[in-house]
Image (cartoon, rainbow, N blue to C red):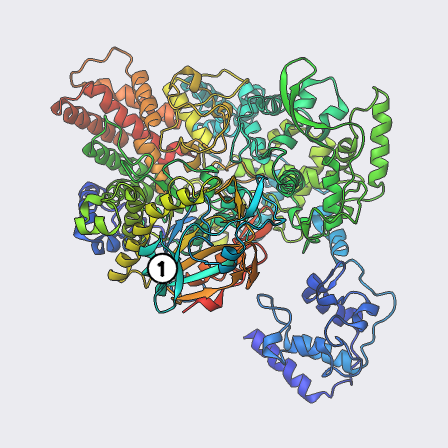
Amino acid sequence: MTKNTPLFPCGRIGKVTSRREWLCRAGAGAGMIGLANLFSEQGLLAATPPDGSSDPVTSLRPRQGHFPAKAKSVIWLFMEGAPSAVDMFDRKPELDKRDGQTTDIQAFFGNPGPLMKSPFSFKQYGECGQWVCDKYTHVAKHVDKLAFIKSCYSESNDHVPAIYQINSGLPRPGFPTAGAWVTYGLGSENQNLPGYVVMGNTQGAKGGPHNWGAGFLPSTFQGALFRSQGAPVLNLTRQPQVSKQDQLAQLDLMAKLNDEHLRRHMRDAEFANRMDSFELAFRMQKEATDVVDLSRETRQIHELYGIDNPRSKSFGSKCLMARRLVESGVRFVQVYSDGEWDAHDNLDENHTHHCAATDVPVAGLLTDLEQRGLLDSTLVIWGGEFGRMPISQNGKGRDHNPKGFLQWMAGAGIKGGVSYGATDEIGYEAVENRVSVNDLHATILHLLGLDHERLTYFHNGRSYRLTDVAGEVIQEILS
Amino acid sequence: MAVWVGLFGGMAFAQTEPAGRKSVDFVREIQPILRDHCYECHAGTTEEAGLNLGVKAKAMRGGESEKAIVAGNAKESLLFQLVSGADENRLMPPDGNEPLSEEQIRLLRNWIDQGATWPDQTDIVDPKLQRARKHWAFQRLAQTTVPTPQSKDHWSRGPIDRFVRRKQQDAGLSPSKPADARTLVRRLYFDLIGLPPAPQQIDQFTLAHSKDPDSAVRNLVDRLLDSPRYGERWGRHWLDVARYADSDGQEADMDRPHAYVYRDFVIQAFNDNMPYDQFVRWQIAGDEFEPENDDAISATGFLTAGPAFKLPDSFLESERLLNRYNELDDVISTLGSGLLGITVACARCHDHKYDAFSAKEYYQLLGVFHSGDRVTAKLPSGKEGFFFRDFDHKRRTTWLFRRSDFYDREIEVPIGFPAMLSSGADADEYWQRAKDAYAQIGEAKSTLQRRALADWITDTQQGGGALLARVFVNRVWHHHFGKGLVGTTSDFGVRGDAPIHPELLEYLAKEFVDGGWNLKALHREILTSAVWRQGSTREASDQRGPEIDSANHLLWRMTPQRLEAEVIRDAMLAASDTLNLQAGGPGFKPYIAPEANLARNIKGEGYPKDAPDDATTRRRSVYMFHKRLIPYPMFQAFDRPDLMTSCAARQNTTVAPQAMVILNDRFVRSVARDFAERLVQSPPDDSLPAKNDLRPMIETAFEISFARLPTETEIETSIQFIESQTRARTERETPDPRLQALTDFCQTLFGLNEFIYVD
């Protein structure tokens, strides 16, 4: 092929007339028939333009990391509002003993009460003997797969800056989030779906789209907010006046008229990429709609995820969708819990409710990923934006606590059944092997084959990283 | 090959020559090695591990580890051990940096073995400042000699062309042929006012161009610069730099109903061609120059436009302080990268790693704004405004917070401006002059520190003015050509890109300042140049171009530019003839689909769920209300920055969500329908339109959309499409088949490359 012959493997220029058939075929091939065919179609599209002038940085095409990866994708179960470690996984006998004692701990909202023991009872599970409360018994069965990080800390006492920080490393809005960094570093396996999907809190997003924003990275890498019902993303549905056939005809016309323009020009890669983007958009309409169509799953699967139970239906649906997305090649999925684990007034009531909403779905997800062989290539993360105080608030609640909290990870590259780090004996402050948000991010990137010190982007005069100027990989939890 | 030979030669030399025979010269041979490889962490105020290799006494004393230099014994010297890789785990410079060459290691060894002679008076106390003093961007503006016109050069129109032509000739490249009249008229309209030319405007220009191309361009440039639409277009570029938005941006994301007074100030200032130095001074301290002037006070909206988050006083003090200092950091970061093209935020925790900007200078700059805050209050005229105001005339104490710890209050810092850009007067003198000047008009209500900074930053002789001018001129170039003469539009520091045409940039910056910081004159000079008027197509350009200079650094052709998000929307509205040109005033809130119109905890007025699509929401995009937590999806798809931080150069991505906007967005479809209705002059009947009815419609549609007429093939293709769509829709028995078919056609035009790119 000579340098100036605008002929692509898909036959864009050479055979414009076959375009419609080709699009029809690709559209019908997606979904039920399986993804192999689709991937091969994408393989063709993913070919770099022969002039090599395309800017790879803005593309979602798969890229090599810095070193071989353990994880191909991530499912991050984000427990918004901040669950309490001492009431779920981090049993503190000393807290039981000192129940009712006063302390000099300062609380965010003021009005600090005395130390308060957990209202829940605990049991040991698995070979590792990890303690889990009686509200999380389904997840408890998986403890031998989980690595608990019990010594996390972050900077802000307030939800929104804290959520910004757990997502972007900084307690301020406007910086690229972990999912954006990951897709910037690795692209995504499926070009018909966004590479970074967020299944939001049904009550809306506290702090808004900055929580899945790309900040100063190209907007290609910004998370796409999926709804769990109806059309999952914006502009996925055709306007009522436009049928699928109308749109195919439009794409056909567009290809013909663009062809004229392309002939006159230097083959600027942007022009060709734009034509690709319309085809992808067309196919995305089908594939994204299919991927969120949970009716394609069996009743047993619905039960496994707790979708049959009204209490866990919403979060269960999101977890199942997360599995379907990862299975389809999406790189990074973040699932928000609904409402808030923000137990200021009554910890027992709040956490009982949220445990019931998430216990079966989380356990179901782990089981399902494992039975499909996906757990070997998927990193699962569970945790909130900070933790909760060992002292009481408003009688039976607990206030925010960024000084010590817990996250767990499971799946690809994670050593199961281990605990790393510790808070003090009452669970107030991380004291042993303290883990910063930068450390968590460094570890996530590491599992994906990315060196957090080398994944950089130059902006306003400086090379930025997800981990800013800090962060160490937590080697002890790696398999 | 050459490297291999060189290395081999060096090693052979090292083996045959006994150490110490040839005396090593410290200044000539050793200091450059230290400067290039060690100073970054071990000199000036950065003394990692306690080691400073810039100053003899400190270097000889060593750092926290063993002695770095044992004179006369390289093997015992930690410096030599670490750079030579004797210990694999402790190699210096650290991972990620270029290791020393064999030759450099040999020189160091010999130098130490020979006694580590370090002559007096050769200490480098502040290497970054020394480097800054030599850095091109931090120099005073210099006079540049324009290349003399060559007798056989019929292409050049002015100095810009002669600078560019000279480099092209050196590379053996020819410029592209000039773009034709229709291409030029479209390019000029979009570039200067962000709207497409109407058919009669195209006719006017092409006629004038056929008689005298130079004067046709000159006249049209003048006319467009006089249009009030110009400020709306070029003001938008500035609003990106100013991270302007209409809400707070944090959790509550409260509306800022009066923020628009700043946006209107910017647009008006561009329209009035306010001298850029005054424009900058007012944005920093308008109230301290003209306390009775609405515009001058509104201009300080530059300082207040960033995200902010007011916490109730009952919340933890540390949390409130964190917010306060984040907000001040936003102000001076925007000032640094937005005005001066230097990064300052790093110095919040430590001295800047590369540029001579210290933590102390960071807090000195912060101190200028520490005595005030954003307020919503009355402007002198009585109108509500949103601007910056000092609490009173007393300066608030400012400390150097080591590692940004705002409870560390041991080191007070006085007012001060970056030394690397200063020569002569210090900050106190500027401050005194500001006080003296203000005393002429009355008693100061503020500290006048901002006025001092404003004077310093625009002072080309002793302050930051030269850099200010270079950064701005480069951005103007960037917007005209899609790429700056300096690629890193917000980084002119020592790590930024070097200019590709340094003399041209210097010439333009000097002319700009000498001409009174006159932006419109700069536009004229650029737009009437032959460089800017080149064609972008393959036929127009030198065939060797892609091989010799594929990145087009030498400007041998025009690079087609994609329209920005706002311009795409405005161009669609213009095509449909439904653009409402009402200027200024509060922003309008367009309809946003429920999928994107959600955010929890928003306080105050929420975003309307059912905003209408009518004339009130079909104003120019620059007047759209930007609520930070609910960004307009179409703009987000087309790379509008999130306006949380300063942005001087937008991303330019090509992704499927953009295509989904064109294909499926309700607004796009509805505007396409209006476009179709515009094409149908006679009332639509539902019968199949005859061929000769369609031809003029298609011609008009092409001319409106692309400023050119369609080819015969394009007409044929379009007719086939519209007829086939009308038939299909008639068969499906959907309403208005003919109008809908034309709408399908118009919507497709919006999706074409030719619509959203300017040749």
Residue B163 placement: quadrant? top right
Q: Residue B315's spot in the image, x, y percent?
A: 60, 37
**Horizontal placement of A101 versus B181: left or right?**
right
Q: Furthest-left residue in view?
A: B731
Q: Is residue A440 above or below residue A416?
A: above
Q: Is residue B145 above or below residue B596?
A: below
Task: Note whether residue B417 is visible.
Answer: yes
Q: Is residue B704 above or below residue B154?
A: above
Seen from the viewer's position, the closer of residues B487 and B669 is B669
Which residue is painted at 71% across and 75% down in the image? B79
Subunit ID for the residue under disc 1: A
Residue beneath disc 1: A72
Which residue is painted at 53% across and 21% down in the image? B229
Q: Quadrant of the N terminus of chain A?
A: bottom left
Seen from the viewer's position, the closer of residues B748 and B258 is B258
Tell me the element at label 1. Answer: loop
Q: Residue B526's spot in the image, x, y percent?
A: 59, 34
**Horizontal placement of B293 versus B729: left or right?**
right
Seen from the viewer's position, the closer of residues A265 and B426 is B426
Task: Note whether residue A7 is visible.
Answer: no
Three-letter code for the amino acid on which mark 1 is drawn: Lys
Which residue is painted at 68% across and 13% down in the image? B381
Seen from the viewer's position, the closer of residues A328 and B528 is A328
Q: Residue B529's spot in the image, x, y percent?
A: 58, 34
Q: Quadrant of the C terminus of chain A?
A: bottom left
Q: Furthest-top residue in view?
A: B683
In the rendered picture of this protein, how many numbered marks are placed on residues?
1
Q: Residue B464's spot in the image, x, y percent?
A: 74, 40
**Horizontal placement of B535 versus B501: left or right?**
left
At label 1, counting other C-alpha atoms closer than 10 Å, the crowd grade (few under 14, some 14-19, many 20 or more) is many
